[in-house]
Amino acid sequence: MEGMALPNVQCVYGSLVVAIDLSQLPVRFRFMAMSRTSTKLVALGLVIEEPGSGHQIERRLNERLASTQFRQSAAKHALERAETQGLVCKVGRKYQAMPAGVEYFERWLRSSSVLPPVREDLLARVALCRPKDMPRLIEVLREAERACVTVVEVLNEQSRRDAPAMAVRGWRRHIDIAVANSDAAWWDARIKWLEDLLEGVQSAWRAYQAERRPGGPAGA
């Protein structure tokens, strides 16, 4: 929160401890507090798009986000929980979104991503976004990319400062270096993935805007 001191986060590589000062990261970022996107949020987004039965929502979830490998019947159970929380209601066999559910979903869709970025979280946002959400979604992806770049810079600077301590010979030195290098490569891979995702989203947004212009493909 603004005005509050942010703690340091320690990344441990064997005997090497790297401290990351959270004040160097974008203020709106928070470190990962969940392992993957809540099925409830994804199911809620699908209901907002088009009301449907639990079975229909389950099928659409698996079609739209097949690579995320949600558990069987995950959407059905998530919708049951959402109903008890007043986020959806059941009319006949179909679930419909309540105003509180729409607000809850849109607040998540426009919020900053977690750090490190969770693949399922960002892919779900992209899959469920609407044209009006696109400017903010592009900003969220850029925030995530900048935050990852900042973490890599901090890790590299810390490694340079600790280089004399790492000059000690022996097994521990070699394995610590291997782990630190692997972690840097992990962050670099996330940055590349975010760059590709951002490029794809921006390309889709430009194509959509071109279709909406007078004389564009849609009006041809």
Image (tube, helix red, strand yellow):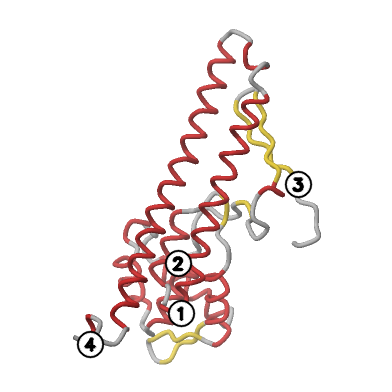
Q: From the image, tell me which residue sits under label 4.
A: 219
Secondary structure of the residue carrying numbered label 1: helix
Q: Crowding near pointer 3: few (<14 within 10 Å), some, many (20+)?
A: few
The C terminus is located in which quarter? Answer: bottom left
Q: Residue at x 68, y 37 (%)?
A: 10
Secondary structure of the residue carrying numbered label 3: loop
As shown in the figure, which amino acid type bears the numbered disc 4?
Gly
- Labelled pair 2, 1 in contact (Cβ < 8 Å): no
Secondary structure of the residue carrying numbered label 4: helix
Answer with mark 3 or mark 2, whichever residue precedes in sequence.
3
As shown in the figure, which amino acid type bears the numbered disc 2?
Arg
Mark-to-mark CA distance, 2 and 1: 13 Å
Secondary structure of the residue carrying numbered label 2: helix
- Labelled pair 3, 2 in contact (Cβ < 8 Å): no
| Extreme residue in the top direction | 169
- Labelled pair 3, 4 in contact (Cβ < 8 Å): no
Q: Crowding near pointer 1: few (<14 within 10 Å), some, many (20+)?
A: few
Q: Is residue 173 above or below residue 201?
A: above
Q: From the image, tell me which residue sits under label 3.
A: 7
Q: Crowding near pointer 4: few (<14 within 10 Å), some, many (20+)?
A: few
Q: In the figure, residue 126 lies in which quadrant?
A: bottom left
Mark carried by residue 125: 2
Mark-to-mark CA distance, 3 and 2: 29 Å
Q: Residue at x 50, y 41 (%)?
A: 187
Q: From the image, tell me which residue sits under label 1.
A: 132
